[in-house]
Amino acid sequence: MKGRHLEAKGKGEYTYDYANDMLLFKIKNRDYLKSLDFDNLIVDIDKEGFITGLRIFDASKIFNIPKLALKNIKSWRFNASIEDKKVTIQLEFIPILRNKPLIKQGQNLVREAIGSKVSNSEVLCTVA
């Protein structure tokens, strides 16, 4: 059974911390409530129960992309859902290296939120 849906088209932003190889995608102007930690992936949940942020540690290793390319992402989107305590995130982005896009397959990140009080929801976020 699907829960609530949040459409955040054009309300996203990303940052990349080169020194720590940490990639962050988030929806602007949402009220943070808590985070779910899945080792190298942290998901931020807002006060309405939507996934509004995604932090990926060791991003260059996880995606097999040079760190320099992660500093310049042309476009991105994530579609995240929580259903029966299973967190599913589909992440697509186009990193640029030497003025050329690196086309890679999208990543599906599925984790189980065992012991967490999360309600079913779905969110789609894209950059403007």
Image (tube, helix red, strand yellow):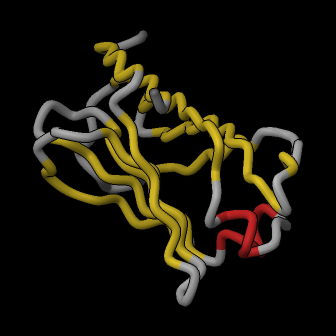
- In the rendered image, the vertical position of residue 121 relative to residue 49, given as above or below: above
Quadrant occupied by the N terminus: top left
Q: 10 or 44, which lies in front?
A: 10
Q: Residue furthest front?
A: 99
Query: 93 left or right of 28?
Result: right
x and y percent of residue 70 in the render?
67, 64
Instruction: Say whether residue 115 is visible.
Output: yes
x and y percent of residue 95 in the render?
73, 52
Q: Which residue is rendered at x = 46% and y = 61% of the image?
A: 15
Query: 17 left or right of 106?
Result: left
Q: Residue furthest bottom?
A: 19
Instruction: Say whether residue 41 is visible.
Output: no
Q: Which residue is rendered at x = 62% and y = 66% of the image?
A: 71
Quadrant occupied by the C terminus: top left
Q: Residue furthest top?
A: 1
- In the rendered image, the vertical position of residue 17 relative to residue 111, given as above or below: below
- In the rendered image, the vertical position of residue 35 relative to residue 6, given as above or below: below
x and y percent of residue 9 in the render?
41, 20
Query: 30 left or right of 65?
Result: left
- In the rendered image, the vertical position of residue 82 relative to residue 93, given as above or below: above
Q: 116 or 92, which lies in front?
A: 92
Q: How many marks?
A: 0
Q: 125 or 95, which lies in front?
A: 95
Quarter residue 67 falls in: bottom right
Q: Which residue is rendered at x = 62% and y = 37% of the image?
A: 75
Q: Which residue is rendered at x = 33% and y = 30% of the image?
A: 11
x and y percent of residue 45 in the render?
26, 46
